[in-house]
Image (cartoon, helix red, strand yellow):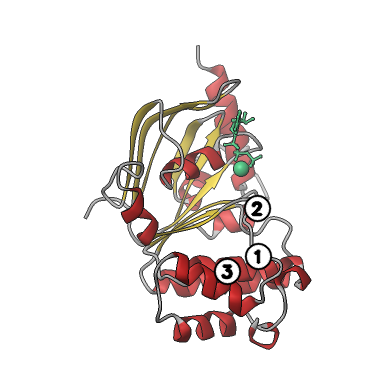
Amino acid sequence: MTPAVTLNGVVKRYATARALAGLTLDVERGEMFGLIGPDGAGKTTAIRLMCGLLHADKGEVRVLGHDPVAAHRRISEQVGYLSQRFSLYGDLTIDENIAFFAEVHGVSRYHARRDQLLEMTQLTPFRKRLADRLSGGMKQKLALACTLVHEPTLLLLDEPTTGVDPVSRREFWKLLSESLSRGITILMSTPYMDEAERCTRVALVHEGRTLAVDEPSTLRALMPGPAGRRVPPSLEDVFIAKLAEQEAKP
Ligand SMILES: Nc1ncnc2c1ncn2[C@@H]1O[C@H](COP(=O)(O)OP(=O)(O)OP(=O)(O)O)[C@@H](O)[C@H]1O
Ligand SMILES: [Mg+2]
């Protein structure tokens, strides 16, 4: 089977900035893949290219075996995208928001899945409440439920848990684990290193390039540690070491 996502030497410029400078990575089917990088590294740009919302200037983008721009309709049926600044409809209830997203994707028999998603996110008691009147964590869980209601095979999540309290974050992750057990592929960008540690593989991204792609434990094991190091290296240590390595190259 083709990988869920392939980016090969992808370059993307905006009028005033080069966001991607030859980004290369593969996401295998069924994995939980993390995009890790500082502000402005190019994470959102990479995800928007995968959704077919942007054109690459150079390089190859393949999603579920297709060019996501040319096959935009087909891709949007199979992909769930949660943008960094996603929008729920504040004047619609939880139920109405889910119904809206199901209808957008042309799904009419979503009620059983909706009820299950609301149970898993502990949102069932609030289903008649307007989205504007939900807490930040509840909004984020509802947004994930809306993204999952059309049963996508690939989930693209752009910093979905930023600013979410730890309890909601745990419930959010429960839903991600359930999705993985159904065989869904997930790619998420996150600034949280504990979330990066839970990914099967991560790409460390800096200034639009991949510094490294591997399993978190493999990346940590590659770190040359000082003799007698008491604390094992963190992914953050790996990131900084990879950056120094890159900058030392002529
Ligand atoms: N619409 C745009 N027009 C011009 N420059 C842009 C635009 N969107 C992003 N950029 C620039 O492209 C680079 C990559 O931005 P991008 O949003 O992809 O990064 P990011 O890794 O998602 O950052 P963050 O962690 O802050 O969300 C940055 O330098 C950013 O300023
Ligand atoms: Mg971003």
User: Element at badge 1?
Assistant: loop
Of tags 2 and 1, the one toward the viewer is 1
Amino acid type shown at disc 3 = Trp
Q: Are marks 2 and 1 in contact (CB under 8 Å)?
A: no
Disc on the earlier residue, 2 or 3:
3
Q: Confirm or reject: label 2 Cβ below 8 Å from ligand 1.
A: no
Q: How far, Cα to Cα, is label 1 from label 3?
A: 23 Å
Say if 202 sits above or below 210 in the image. Answer: below
Which residue is nearer to you in this view: 40 or 113? Answer: 113
Does residue 40 appear anywhere in the picture?
Answer: yes
Which residue does the numbered mark 3 point to in the structure image?
173
Which residue is nearer to you in this view: 20 or 53? Answer: 53
Which residue does the numbered mark 1 point to in the structure image?
89
Percent x, y of residue 81: 49, 56
Q: Which mark is residue 61?
A: none
| Residue drawn where x is 63% and y is 43% of the image | 236
